[in-house]
Image: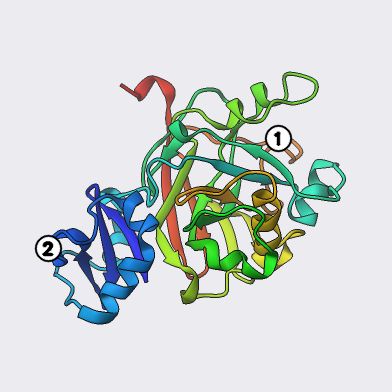
Amino acid sequence: MKLANLDGRAVALVDGGVVDLAKASDGYLPSEPDEAIARLADVKSWFADHGPEPTSDGSEGEFLSDLSRLGPPVTSPRQIFAVGLNYVDHGTETGLAIPDEPLVFTKFASSIAGPGDPIALPTETCDWEVELVAVVGTCGRDIPARNAFDHLAGFCIGQDISERRSQMAGSPPQFSLAKSHRGFTPIGPWLTTTDELDANDLAISTRIDNETVQSARTSDMVFDIATLVSHLSGICELFPGDLIFTGTPSGVGFSRTPARFLAPGNVLHSYIEGLGELRNPCIGKETVR
């Protein structure tokens, strides 16, 4: 199942069409995307019992060609965790040692954006980092790795956009604010539930315009998804809609010689096999009203 935020309403993309959850269920299911994720068990049960016919409001293919009607599948996560140095090649390109346990920082929810939203670049030193995002479905603390997927609603694509100048200005570096400017956390294009694919081995890549700048597989992660869920829940309670950015592969701009950054006019394409694509145009900060 794929759950999407279509024009601000929770919908399921099924059989080449769209099912508006609240309308199809006469209000039994929620219209809010975040509530639909929190009630995913009810959504699945209702679909199993009713088998609703999709409307003709669009399909996956149509939405991927025009992302303008799709918002972020999670609009107001309580917590956004992000994992650093979780691909060996990324550690190598940064010159930093791979940590013995997950290296975790946070992003702030005000930076959330949709799969086709513009990214306003506040400086000339903004970088890209494509990531597989795990979306929490049910609350939990001290979750064993073997039960991790029971607490996940599904997965989507995310970009951890980073303003490198402020990130690296201090000693030690300061991550969270530099990664939380407006629009710096585009996610989507929808949430794909855990039963739809094996998220532990998917192709993942970034293109700037027509040039591929990142390419790897999620199987290259140092700490896999289950390990990350277990580790985080051993410290923080996880809540429905929480986002876990699971790390980025090599190919970021800051580690290139010379360094390379996003510029107004670029289009940032973020792809993960089976999950779709984000397509975010980059614009100058002065164009935002």
Position of 77 with respect to 103 (left or right) is left
User: Along the line of sight, which residue is nearer the eye, 2 or 285?
Assistant: 2
The N terminus lies in quadrant: bottom left
Q: Which mark is residue 46?
A: none
Q: Is residue 247 visible?
A: no
> Which amino acid, by three-letter code, is at mark 1?
Ala
Using the numbered discs, state the Cα–Cα distance from disc 2 to disc 1 in whole angstroms: 54 Å
Q: Which residue has dot 1 on it?
A: 259
Position of 273 with respect to 74 (left or right) is right
> Which amino acid, by three-letter code, is at mark 2?
Asp
Position of 268 with respect to 85 (left or right) is left
Q: Which residue has dot 2 on it?
A: 26
The C terminus lies in quadrant: top left
Q: Position of residue 71 (x, y in %)?
A: 32, 47
User: Along the line of sight, which residue is nearer the eye, 266 or 53?
Assistant: 53
Callout 2: 10 Å neighbours few (<14), some, many (20+)?
Answer: few
Secondary structure of residue under mark 1? loop
Q: Could you tell which of marks 2 and 1 lies nearer the N-terminus?
A: 2
The relative height of residue 97 versus residue 210 in the rendered view (above or below) is above
Residue 204: which quarter of the image? bottom right
Position of 120 with respect to 207 (left or right) is left
Mark in the foreground, 2 or 1: 2
At x 57%, y 67%, the residue is: 149
At x 29%, y 68%, the residue is: 13
Secondary structure of residue under mark 2? loop
At x 36%, y 41%, the residue is: 117
Q: Is residue 114 visible?
A: yes
Q: Position of residue 185 (x, y in %)?
A: 49, 40
